[in-house]
Image (tube, helix red, strand yellow):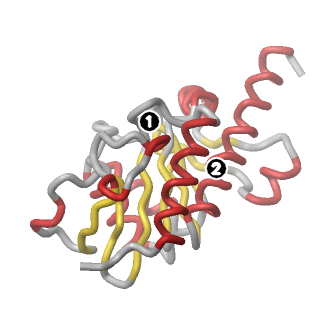
């Protein structure tokens, strides 16, 4: 079993707090993970990202194992993304404007310069069961091979990065872009 360094714990705690404070997750929504070799550190099922403690971070393997007990339900999706990509960290949020865009678009095409430069067009994918399903894992991991973030319709974005901070940046950038798109639609621009 791995000992979580102070720096890594601070990264989980700070990212979780930022997700909560920005409204990207509800009190008990979303999840975070980091891959280190063939091990995954992932937030506990039902944890409050805005108030993470060391007990809220569970260590498990890249393959299903008894250590999965207590992990976020989205572990199946995180594993698939790690297997399919070079991701070292994953952030999943329930951002309001991004979820709204997923209801009306197959592709989120930013209007703002930052999101265009950082993310480009962001794919929206669908699954019959959106929470913790093998189908969601398959469609998201396929899109994240070529994109930094993908959105599961009605459920929200999954973003990859070299660090939690980078993955959070992708979620945050997309949410700002989706908000701009919503304002543009409302104003008729």
Graded by Cα atoms within 10 Å as few (under 14), some (14 to 19) or many (20 or more), the crowding at tag 1 reads many
In the picture of the structure, the residue carrying the numbered disc 2 is: 122
- Whether tag 2 and tag 1 are in contact, CB under 8 A, the answer is no
Residue 138 visible in the shown view: no
The image quadrant that residue 46 belongs to is top left
Residue 149 picture location, percent across and down = 58, 55
Q: Disc 1 designates what residue?
A: 155
Residue at figure coordinates x 10%, y 66% from the top left: 66
Tell me residue 61's x, y (percent).
Answer: 24, 74
SS at mark 2?
strand
Which residue does the image show at 49% across and 41% down from the upper left? 50
Percent from the top left, x then y, of residue 12? 49, 58
The one of 176 and 29 positioned closer to us in this rendering? 29
In the rendered view, tell whether residue 44 sits above or below residue 30.
Answer: below
* Residue nearest the observer in this picture, 93 or 17: 17
Dividing the picture into quadrants, the one containing residue 183 is top right
Image quadrant occupied by the N terminus: bottom left
Q: Is residue 20 above or below residue 70?
A: above
């Amino acid at each position: 079993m791995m000992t979580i360094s102070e720096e890594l714990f601070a990264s989980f705690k700070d990212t979780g707090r930022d997700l909560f404070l920005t409204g990207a997750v509800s009190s008990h929504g979303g999840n975070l993970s980091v891959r280190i070799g063939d091990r995954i550190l992932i937030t506990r099922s039902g944890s409050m990202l805005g108030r993470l403690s060391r007990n809220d971070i569970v260590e498990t393997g890249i393959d299903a194992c008894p250590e999965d007990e207590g992990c976020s339900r989205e572990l199946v999706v995180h594993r698939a993304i790690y297997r399919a990509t070079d991701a070292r960290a994953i952030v999943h949020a329930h951002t309001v404007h991004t979820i709204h865009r997923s209801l009306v678009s197959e592709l989120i095409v930013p209007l703002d310069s930052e999101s265009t430069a950082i993310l480009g067009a962001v794919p929206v994918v669908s699954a019959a069961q959106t929470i913790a399903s093998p189908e969601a894992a398959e469609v998201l991991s396929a899109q994240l091979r070529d994109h930094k973030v993908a959105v599961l319709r009605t459920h929200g974005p999954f973003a990859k990065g070299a660090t939690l901070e980078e993955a959070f940046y992708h979620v945050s950038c997309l949410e700002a872009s989706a908000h701009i798109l919503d304002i543009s639609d409302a104003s008729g621009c």
